[in-house]
Image (tube, rainbow, N blue to C red):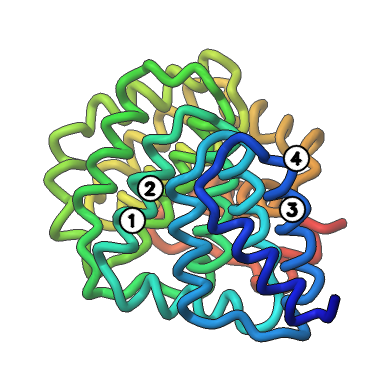
Amino acid sequence: IDKETAMKVSLAAIFSPSENYQFITTIAATVVLQYSDEIDISQKDCESLLKSAMNAQGMRAYVIYKLLIEINGNGHKRLLALLQSNSNFFNSLIQSILECEFGFVTIAGANFLLVLFEMNPISSEIDISEPFTKAMKIILSGKVDDIDKLDSLLLIVRLLISMRESMTQIIQVLQENEDLIFIAFQRQIELNNSFISIHFFLFIFAASHFFKHWLNKLRELVIDSQFSALLVHVLETSLNRRTINDALEVIQIVLGGITPKHLRLDQNLSFTLASG
């Protein structure tokens, strides 16, 4: 069987909605990944891969998201173009990630979003108010027992809040939930959830761009809690480069006095330190 045929058959296997043969999806995803740097994946197939991930459950969804994260060639470029140009598709993707009952799938979905949009701003034409509101509601509900899932939800709202042009759409959500946001942050610190506390801190700091008094509240909370100890714990124990990079950013903010302007490491140097 030639490579083109193997790719075509493997994609068809992934597009199949059956959940009964998850091992087939795993094998097919391995083949697609292997040949993705040699055989171009069309825009239509990229769209079908996204829809398959959104409609799948459990391990099958995880395998497809993992493929989307690692795919080679023009895959990421086409996936990005697809989501940037279609607000409904973008919001449907986030909704499916938020509503997933499996924490490990939420983690994979959040990491996929970060891979695409961490270095590529979300289009200002996309209305993110609905997914942002839903994500905040889940985070502040206190009903998420899966720490990794809560961590991923915070990554998603941090990504969405970085889209400055859309802040007018979600600023009311932040204002109405100000007390709940700080209470939730304080609760995570008291529970010694170090990794979640780091992402909560960065989320609040990003939101403080529009609420300057949040900086004072954030500063007081850091001083009056064991947050610094949790930050050190993350740096000592984390093996994840992105998490270490976030912790380094928090250190810069804290050492700078938690002010709007803080000294930032060069991004390449930051990743070098995180990798080391």
**Residue contact between numbered discs 1 and 2, judged by CB atoms under 8 Å:** yes
Q: Which residue is mark 3?
A: 241
- Rendered view: 169 above or below 227: below
Q: How many marks?
A: 4
Q: Badges 3 and 1: C-beta atoms under 8 Å apart?
A: no
Which of disc 4 and disc 1 is earlier in sequence?
1
- The image quarter containing residue 228 is top right
Numbered disc 3: secondary structure:
helix
Is residue 76 placed above or below 59 in the rendered structure?
A: below
What residue does disc 2 label?
Answer: 157
What is the distance, in whole Å, between disc 1 and disc 4 at their CAs?
25 Å
Q: Kindly identify the amino acid type of the residue bearing the numbered disc 1.
A: Ile
- Mark 4 = which residue? 235
Q: Earlier in the sequence, mark 3 or mark 1?
A: 1
Q: Is residue 255 visible?
A: yes
Q: Position of residue 71 (x, y in %)?
A: 68, 69
The answer to whether residue 33 is left or right of residue 263 is right
Q: Position of residue 6 (x, y in %)?
A: 76, 72
Question: Marks 3/1: CA distance?
Answer: 22 Å
Of 96 and 49, nearer the camera is 49
* Contact between labelled residues 3 and 4, with CB atoms less than 8 Å apart: no
Question: Mark 1 or mark 4: which is in front?
Answer: 1
The disc labelled 3 sits on which kind of residue?
A: Arg
How many neighbours does mark 1 have within 10 angstroms: few (below 14), some (14-19), or many (20 or more)?
many
User: Is 110 located above or below residue 200 in the figure?
Assistant: below
